[in-house]
Image (cartoon, rainbow, N blue to C red):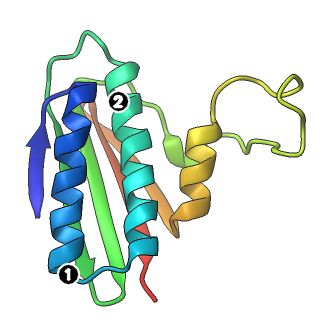
Amino acid sequence: MQKTFKRAMHSLDEVFDFIGEFMKAHAVDQSASYSINLAVEELFTNMVKYNPGNANDISITIQKNKDDLKVTLVDTEVEPFDVANTAEVDVTKSLEERKAGGLGIHLIKKMVDRLEYEHNNRQSRITLIKHLE
């Protein structure tokens, strides 16, 4: 299932509806649905927030392959930023000791089983894999 969304925060409701429709149609449990919703929200929001001058839409594809969910977000005309290889966040430090940023991607890495990143010809492709129980 694939759909394209306007690059805007108000598109999140439509994104959640799209994900919810897929999850219901494929009888995906609530825990996995929650993880995917949170991860996609974080990534979509970052794509909007960090490329405000970009008017291109963002594409989301969701697939279920046996015991895995695969979600891919594609953004075009963007600079590379490898979300799969960001520095680990030391959550044992106090907020005052931590550097700002990175907590959302840290949470995504904890909630999904695999995070992949590709960048080619100014196109960013982020893929999440979540194993289903």
Q: Dot 2 lies on which element?
A: helix
Which residue is at 32% across, 25% downward?
48
> Which of the 4 image quarters holds residue 72?
bottom left
Q: Residues within 10 Å of mark 1 (few under 14, many from 20)?
A: few
- Left or right for 9, reference 82: left
* One can see residue 59 in this view: no
Q: Amino acid at mark 1?
A: His
Q: Earlier in the sequence, mark 1 or mark 2?
A: 1
Spatial separation of the CA atoms under disc 1 and disc 2 = 27 Å
Across and down, in percent, residue 60 comes to 20, 50
Q: Which residue is mark 1?
A: 26
Q: Is residue 35 above or below residue 66?
A: above
- Left or right for 125, reference 129: left
Q: Which residue is mark 2?
A: 47
Q: Amino acid at mark 2?
A: Met
> Which of the 4 image quarters holds residue 74?
top left
Which residue is at 20% across, 27% downward?
7
Q: Is residue 133 above or below residue 47?
A: below
Q: Which mark is residue 117?
A: none
> Which of the 4 image quarters holds residue 1?
bottom left
Which residue is at 20% across, 75% downward?
24
Viewer-side label of 1, 2? 1
Q: Residues within 10 Å of mark 2 (few under 14, many from 20)?
A: many
